[in-house]
Image (spheres, rainbow, N blue to C red):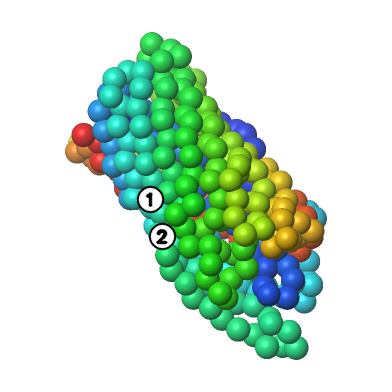
Amino acid sequence: MSIRTSVFLTTLLATTPLFSANAYACACGCGIFDVGTSDMLPTHPGGMAWLEYDFMNQNKNWHDDSKAPAANNSDKDIKTSFFTAGAEYMFNRTWGAEIEVPYWSRHFTTDLGGGDIQQFNHSAVGDVRIKGIYSGLSPDMSTGITFGLKLPTGDHTYANFDRDTEIGTGSTDALLGAYHVGNLTSQFNWFVNGQLDQPFLTTAGYRPGGEVDVSSGIYYDGWDVGDVRISPVAEILGSDRLHDRGINADPANSGYKRVLLAPGLEVDAAGFRIYGDVAVPVYQQVKGNQLTAGELFKLNISHTF
């Protein structure tokens, strides 16, 4: 049900900041996981369900466009495992719907002052995303628009996390995206997939920054080994996030731009698709001091029906 593509180039970012009770912010750049490859793009009526695991270890303090001394940031490390269950169903060749239910497990290390290093662990359901899909812009469903909401279902009240470190943002966000897939040659395909995430209802003095995430890539149509098809993929990911606002935000240490390269591999067999990649930042610019990750890991297993 998804098209097997891996694309060309674009811009996406990946900076993940968080701040301790003392100071520095780290607005997690998790939106990059929501645009990814063409795995989730519809190609015909019917359904698809998937499970995805993503991982980030934010352990490098960054200022502007370069690494900065760890002493400049009271936050020291943020490790997050993202588990997502999702489903998509195209009712016909024009309209469809999608839902994603995330669960995050986060480990946070911070200096509370005077060398008092504390570690906190918290796991909870994240912010659910519900989207509609319109694929009627072209007869082959290669161009489409997505639209929907990110709901404030995630926990945003855990006592040991600041608002930009919490698993949930506490906000309701409007989601608007677009995608296109195409052929470069008989064996190479490309795609571009982008999404705007704009908060419009917020709680408790915290408004996360609006964010644009884009992925673009190229993929080889694959080698057949018996009934298994193997397709290498190359992607460029980019993100641009505005700074947070509100009395419980840290605008001086939030907001970023980032571009990543993500080589990956897709394996298709018997209606199942396994996709994995490792995204590495090649450019990142952050406001203030923020913790960033050296790599972002993704593994997705999907089944069409």
**At label 1, which amino acid type do we have?**
Val
Disc 2: which residue: 125
Quadrant containing the C terminus is top left
Q: Secondary structure at mark 1?
A: strand
Reading the chain from its start, which is encountered first: label 1 or label 2?
Answer: 1
| Front-lying residue, 197 or 192 | 197
Q: Residue furthest top?
A: 139
Q: Secondary structure at mark 2?
A: strand
Q: Is residue 301 visible?
A: yes
Q: Is residue 224 visible?
A: no
**At label 2, which amino acid type do we have?**
Val
Residue 161 in picture, x, y percent from top left = 58, 71
Please, is residue 86 above or below residue 294 in the view?
Answer: above
Residue 93 in picture, x, y percent from top left = 32, 18
Q: Residue at x 42, y 65 (%)?
A: 124
How many residues crowd mark 1 within 10 Å: few (<14), some (14–19), many (20+)? Answer: some
Quadrant containing the N terminus is top left
Horizontal relation, residue 97 to residue 64: left or right: left
Please, is residue 153 above or below residue 236 in the view?
Answer: below
Residue 33 in picture, x, y percent from top left = 50, 47
| Front-lying residue, 133 or 262 | 133
Distance between mark 1 and mark 2 Cα atoms: 8 Å
Q: Residue at x 43, y 49 (%)?
A: 128
Q: Residue at x 48, y 62 (%)?
A: 155
| Front-lying residue, 186 or 294 | 294
The reply to whether dot 1 and dot 2 touch (C-beta < 8 Å) is yes
Disc 1: which residue: 101
Residue 139 in picture, x, y percent from top left = 38, 11
How many residues crowd mark 2 within 10 Å: few (<14), some (14–19), many (20+)? Answer: some
| Front-lying residue, 169 or 9 | 169
